[in-house]
Amino acid sequence: MKYSIFGTGVVGQTIGSKLIANGHEVMMGSRSASNEKGMQWVNNSAGKGKLGTFSDAAKFSDIIFNCVKGEMSLEVMKLAGEPNLKGKLIIDISNPLDFSKGMPPSLTVCNTDSVGEQIQRNYPDSFVVKTLNTTNCQVMVNPSLVAGEHDLFLSGNDPESKEKVRTILQREFGWKNIIDLGDITTARGVEMLLPIWVRLYGALKTPNFNFHIAK
Amino acid sequence: MKYSIFGTGVVGQTIGSKLIANGHEVMMGSRSASNEKGMQWVNNSAGKGKLGTFSDAAKFSDIIFNCVKGEMSLEVMKLAGEPNLKGKLIIDISNPLDFSKGMPPSLTVCNTDSVGEQIQRNYPDSFVVKTLNTTNCQVMVNPSLVAGEHDLFLSGNDPESKEKVRTILQREFGWKNIIDLGDITTARGVEMLLPIWVRLYGALKTPNFNFHIAK
């Protein structure tokens, strides 16, 4: 299959490398088609990875992982171009962390809105599904790094798109427990998990943990 | 032992009844010492429960459970009286849920502040420990309602007060897994769990669940 990834940072690279290892074609999108981190990733991909602009990447596949920062997401979608996003599945992994006021980070948007909602509202002909943002990127692609039962969440307006994402998470990354929270407004809840995530990282001294909903 | 409880709602009553069942003396505080819900609770307490004003309750014990709504907490502390709160342990269970804009609720304070911090900031000679607010009140006093491993969190500036609260949670309610997140600013993280809690309640169709941090 073909997958597109917005963002050449560690999250985008980790997702992209896993998808390539699984035999897929991946194009990473950036502001520049000669982005240094992106080029390095392409050079290490044994010819299976591609790099382009956000617009190139949006055209490349019907499934896009949004791995840029939360506060950059709307600008990046604009660079990708509305016609190139139309009808596409946008898997939004972003978090609106604001480090500008020092540690611990606050959120640039929360409580009555979320990045997931912002993208969906601005691109009503795309299918936004929020997921994966609640765990470290190593755990995203290898849930067995965390022992026992632990969960991912899905937020999105389109049930069919959420089922597609569920299948991708199971097949490509090995996720077992995936809770459908409801429509895209539930993205507020998962983005608002970040403040405790950051403090748990401090308390536990490892990023390899995850939320589990015990019943 | 003696315990005080601010608030005569279902959370306060549940905590109070459990403490009485464990053989303790409990005074519930309200705006009025003849509060109807409080009087009913006293009448069902086999002579072990008391009702008073917030001020009466603050004087009654060195350990106070704050079980009023988040947005009422500062006003209630003012009614209790600063001299009566001085040196006291305030176990803050409150959540700043705002239902005024309809469902789902948003938070009246979050991101860069929290109710826990507000109380601590206004009453610097009291020892505020935030805990228990992340689970249903039935689970608060009976963690075995939820299967498997699941966790509570502690937020507070004073290590000794947090250890006192840990002991109370273990001994009175049977909690096993209690994670110290750090100082009172970490109360932001646990209060910001409420938006996903509300959505999980909707998705799971039961309030008897809890967060577990899998490692």
Image (tube, coloured by chain):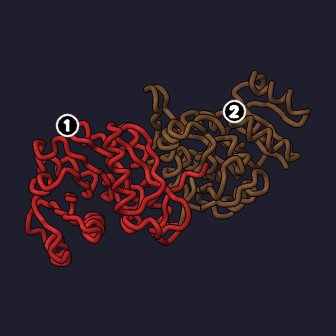
Chain colours: A brown, B red
| Mark 2: few/some/many CA within 10 Å (<14, 14-19, 20+) | some
Q: How far across and how far down the image is residue A140, in percent?
A: 68, 46
Determine the chain carrying the residue at label 1.
B
- The percent coordinates of residue B44 (x first, y second) are 20, 78
Identify which residue, A214 or B193, lies in the foreground: A214
Return the mark for residue B125: 1
**Image-quadrant location for residue A58:** top right
Q: Quadrant of the N terminus of chain B?
A: bottom left
Q: Separation of disc 2 and disc 1 at Cα?
A: 45 Å
Instruction: Give amino acid for label 1.
Output: Asp
Give the residue at x 12% y 68%: B35
The type of residue carrying mark 2 is: Val
Q: Is residue B141 left or right of residue B78?
A: right
Looking at the image, is A214 positioned above or below residue A46?
below
Q: Position of residue A96 (x, y in %)?
A: 52, 38
Query: In this figure, which residue is indicated by the disc labeled 2?
Result: A10
Identify the residue shown where x is 10% and y is 62%: B52
Q: Is B79 or A88 nearer to us in this picture?
A: B79
Establish if A174 lies above or below B25.
above
A65 or B146, nearer to the observer: B146
Q: Is residue B5 visible?
A: no
